[in-house]
Amino acid sequence: MTDDKRELELDFEPKAKGKASSCELLVPIHADNFALALASGYLGGSLKSDAALDLQSYAANGLFAFSGEVPAWAISEGEAGDRVLLSLAGKGGGGAGPRTMELLGGPERITAVRSAYFRDEASLANFNASYDAFPDVPMNIVELAAKWPVCESGERPTDLQELPVEQPSRRSDLDFLGGLAAGIIDLLSENTFDEAIRKFLHEPGTDIAENGRRLLLALEPRTSQVDVSIWTATIEALRSRFGKRGFDRREFLADVEGRLADHGPEAESWVRGCQKVIDAEIDIPSLADSEKIGRRAALAIILSHEPSGLEELESNFETGPRVRALVTAAVYAFAGLSRIASRLKSPAPRMDAVLELGDRMVTGEPVRVEIVTSKTGADLTRHQVIKIGGNSVLERQVEPPAYMVMLKARIQEAGYKVELDGASGQIGIRPGSAKGELIMVEDCSRSSPGNPIVNLVLPIATLGARPTVASFKKLMATAWENATTVALREVGDTEEVVAMASLPLATLDRDELNFHVERLLLVSTELGGKKRKGRRVKN
C-alpha cells in the first residue's frame, strides 16, 4: 500500500458493533471492474474507456476506500450491477475513524487485496459463473467470500467530483511491461535461457526500448549495433500501437522504418527485404539463431504478433530458440498483461512476481532470481523451484542434460556409487563405504551448453567463530601442496571450508575423474575434516 493518502473531510456516525475492523480499508467496486483488475493486476484507473461507472470512476488512478464499513450511498453510486468490497490492510492504532472515506494513491497491486466481499452467496456464485470461463481472468488471486459490512447511515458528499488523471499513460505502460514480465517468467519455466534472463534481470532498463535492448544483449552479447537498432525500433513500434484495434503489417513496418531513418544502408536493406516478404515477392528468410537474431525476431513479429502464433513460428518457420525467446517476450508485451492467458499470471505469488518485474523495468532496480533444486530423481531428473525476490513463483521438472548422464556413467565405471543428497537435491559421489565422504556434484556458474562444467565439492569443516592465522595458513598450505582449491562458503549462519575442483565434461574420461576425486579425499584427510549434515548453501 502506498503512503500517498489524501483524506476527504466527511463526518459519519460512529460504527455499529459486529462489523469489520476499523483497521480494514474497504474499496467498493463494480463487479465487472473487479474482474478487469484481476486480469490486469492493478486497482485504480482503467484500461477501458467504457468501464462500468462506480465510485472509483471519480478517483482517477487512485482508490476511494472506507474504514471498517461502507455507507450504502457508495454502493449505489454509478450504474447498476453487483458491487464487490475489496479488503486492504489499513493502518492500526489511530488514524481515520470508522466509515471515513480516504483517497489512496494508486494504481495498487491486486495482490495487496486480502479478500473480496460479496453481498451474498448468490452474488458470489454469479460472479464465479460469469468470469470463471474467461481465459484471461485468474480466479485464484484473491479470496472470495460472502460478507457485507455496509451501513445505511451517512450521506453522499455534495462536492464529489471526478479527479483529473495524472500520467494518463501509466496504466497502459504497466499493462505492456506486465505482459513483457509474464513472458520472461514463462521463459524461465523452460530451463533454456536461465543465465541470460538472470543477467537481464540483474540490471534491467528504465524504459521500454532500453529493456528491449538489454534483453537482446543478454541473449546474444555479440549483437551488432544495427541489429540492436532494428530490434529496439520494433519494440517501440509495438508500444506505439499497443491497445489499438487491428495490426496492419505494412503500417507497422512503416512505423519501424521511420524509427530507423538515420541508421544506414544495412537497416534500409532490411526494411526493403521485409516489404518483399509481406508482398510475397520472396520467401521468408531463415529465422535461425546462427546470426542477426534481433532483425530476425523483428521479422518474426511482423509475421505473427499474437501469442497464439508462437507455436506456428516454431513449427513452420523453424525459428531458433533465442529468436523465439525474444518474440515470446515481445508478443506477450503487445498482448498486455490484461489479455494474456491466466496461467501466466496465477496463482497470487506468480502474479506478484510479474507485477514486481514490471515495476523494476521502470526503475531499473535489480531482480534476484534463484533456481533451487528441491529433488533429483534416480534418473537424474531435477525438480526445481524458481524464486523471484525470495518468493517461490513456479516449479519445473528438468530432464538431465546429456553430459550429466555421461558423468553418472563415468562415476559408476570408476567404481564409485552415485547417491542423492536429500538436503540439496543434488547428486553426490560416494568413493568408499556408506559412512564415508560424499563429494557433491554442483553446477558451475561458468558452464554453458557448448562447454558444460560441474564443480566437485567436498565439505571439510565448519569455520570457527575466531579462526586463527595458523588455521588459515594450514588451509593454504594444503591447497598448494595438492594443487586443489580450498575455499569458504556461507551455509546458513556459518561458514564452511570446502575442497573443490572444476570438471569440464566435454572430454571427461575415467582417469581424469579418479584424479580429482582422489585429490579431494587427500585434502580432506590432511585437514581432518568431516562432512556436516543438513547443509543449506547460500547461492
Image: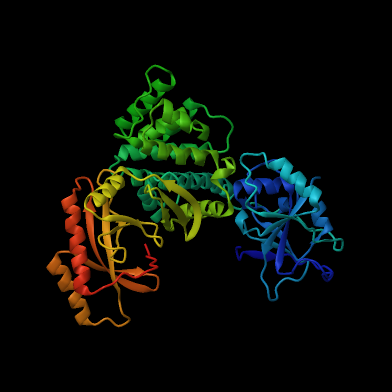
Q: Taking 241 as reference, is 518 above or below it?
A: below
Direction right: furthest residue:
152
Q: Is residue 362 left or right of residue 16?
A: left
Q: Where is residue 281 drawn, in percent x and y?
A: 39, 16
> Residue 139: x, y in percent?
65, 47
Q: Residue at x 44, y 58 (%)?
A: 365
Judged from this view, the residue extending furthest toward the front is 433
Percent across and percent down for residue 20 are: 76, 66
Is residue 521 shown above or below 214?
below
Q: Is residue 342 above or below residue 498?
A: above
Q: Position of residue 234 (x, y in %)?
A: 43, 36
| Residue 292 seen in render | yes
Question: Residue sitting at 77 percent across and 44 percent down?
Answer: 126
Give whichever of 44, 418 is nearer the camera.
418
Number of numbered labels in the structure image: 0
Visual colour scheme: rainbow
Q: The N terminus appears in which quarter of the rendering?
A: bottom right
Q: Is residue 368 left or right of residue 468?
A: right
